[in-house]
């Protein structure tokens, strides 16, 4: 359940987006971006070539007037944005590799980052497949609420999804720098403390470029998710961490050998957290969060790799049990 003010804002924004979508004949996502840009422009309806028409503009202005009466905090805005985007994805099917990362999973990433880094450190975060930005914004807004100083960087190959991330970053007043490009090419990002990503699962079409990665295969297409793990860790500081959402069978897959080579030569595989079965339609689509650490002066392979399975995200008792397991493991394994 969401607080009443988020529910109310949701209804008003949804109506404004639908009015814009009809008046401008665009997709839901494009109308969503238009709406956020209007909000950021102090709730002014942008009119170009007499579109939206006068009647629609007046209707939207009425909705904006009601919205201006409510002040929402950055994390409330992010939740609102997620609800709107989820609503939009019900009418316009997004392919699984384009869907935003749900809160339940995002909050686990936040918990892990809080556990891995001392409170006084300023943290830099990077998502090489940032999409609509929900995962990294969940991290940025919630870490800020936990009194951390954070900044983020994101890359995505899809211009429209990235435009949503850019609009939402501004709307939630998050320090997020975004780049539109293929994340498997050279990047302009300085090494960060933690790389986090809900990776696209599938093949990367550029075989030549894949050859520059340990996880690239010599024949046929390489797995994009494996290459992105390696690339993410290339842009992580020494001793820094990588948190990636991957298919649970990642080690047994046909390209698992190349991935194991990466885990031997450049990064330590420190933990595997299997997400609850209830989140996925079938066995093949189940996912885990893997915890990687880059080689460096202060890092080493942990004596005992964390292998945990979360039974559910719905029962606070089970979640607390996992937190205790993680904290016990951390105390005896991480330096
Ligand atoms: C599951 S989505 C990420 C969702 C995101 N965490 C969110 O909350 O909105 C995976 C993303 O990977 C992007 N992607 C796929 N191949 C890529 C590549 N080579 N470089 C950068 N981004 C890529 C897709 O465009 C998509 O946005």
Image (cartoon, rainbow, N blue to C red):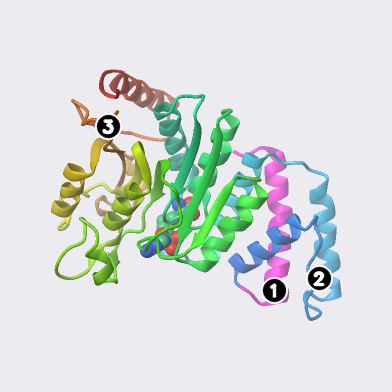
Query: On the image, which quarter does residue 227 sit in?
Result: bottom left
> Secondary structure under badge 2?
helix
- Horizontal placement of 137 versus 195: left or right? right
User: Which quarter of the figure has residue 23?
Assistant: bottom right
Query: What is the spatial separation of the Cα atoms under label 2 and label 1, in whole angstroms?
Result: 10 Å
Q: Residue furthest bottom?
A: 49
Q: Which sits earlier in the primary sequence, circle 3 or circle 1?
A: 1
> In front here: 48 or 275?
48
* Residue 184 seen by the camera: yes
Q: Along the polypeptide, which appears first: circle 3 or circle 2?
A: 2
- Residue at numbered disc 3: 308
Q: Which residues are magenta?
A: 1-26
- The residue that label 2 is drawn on is 56
Mark 3–mark 1 distance (CA, rounded to whole Å):
48 Å
Do the residues bearing badges 3 and 2 touch, measured as CB atoms within 8 Å? no
Determine which quarter of the picture holds residue 39.
bottom right
Q: Which mark is residue 114?
A: none
Do we see residue 98 in this rendering? no
In the rendered image, residue 290 lying in the magenta stretch gets the answer: no
User: Which residue is tagged 1?
Assistant: 22
**Viewer-side label of 3, 1:** 3
| The quarter of the picture showing ligand 1 | bottom left
State the residue at coordinates (59%, 57%). Answer: 166
């Amino acid at each position: 359940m969401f607080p009443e003010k988020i529910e109310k804002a949701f209804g008003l924004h949804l109506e404004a987006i639908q009015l814009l979508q009809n008046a401008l004949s665009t997709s839901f996502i494009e109308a969503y971006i238009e709406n956020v840009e209007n909000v950021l422009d102090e709730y002014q309806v942008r009119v170009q070539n007499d579109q939206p028409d006068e009647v629609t503009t007046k209707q939207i202005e009425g909705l904006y007037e009601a919205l201006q009466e409510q002040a929402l905090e950055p994390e409330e805005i992010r939740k609102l944005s997620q609800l709107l985007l989820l609503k939009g994805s019900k009418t316009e099917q997004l392919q699984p590799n384009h869907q935003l990362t749900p809160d339940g999973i995002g909050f686990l990433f936040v918990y892990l980052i809080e556990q891995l880094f001392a409170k006084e450190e300023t943290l830099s975060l990077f998502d090489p497949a940032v999409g609509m930005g929900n995962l990294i914004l969940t991290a940025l807004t919630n870490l800020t609420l936990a009194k951390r100083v954070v900044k983020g960087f994101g890359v995505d190959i899809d211009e429209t999804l990235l435009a949503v991330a850019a609009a939402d970053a501004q709307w939630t007043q998050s320090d997020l720098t975004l780049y539109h490009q293929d994340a498997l090419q050279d990047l302009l990002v300085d090494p960060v403390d933690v790389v986090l990503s809900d990776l696209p699962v599938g093949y990367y079409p550029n075989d030549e470029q894949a050859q520059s990665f340990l996880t690239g295969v010599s024949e046929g297409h390489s797995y994009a998710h494996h290459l992105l793990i390696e690339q993410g860790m290339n842009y992580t500081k020494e001793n820094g961490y990588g948190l990636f959402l991957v298919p649970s069978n990642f080690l047994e897959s046909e390209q698992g050998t190349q991935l194991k080579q990466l885990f031997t030569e450049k990064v330590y595989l420190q933990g595997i957290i299997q997400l609850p079965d209830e989140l996925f339609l079938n066995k093949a689509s189940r996912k885990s969060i893997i915890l990687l650490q880059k080689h460096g002066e202060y890092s080493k392979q942990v004596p005992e790799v964390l292998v945990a399975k979360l039974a559910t995200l719905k029962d606070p008792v089970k979640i607390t049990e996992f937190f205790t397991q993680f904290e016990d493991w951390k105390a005896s394994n991480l330096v």
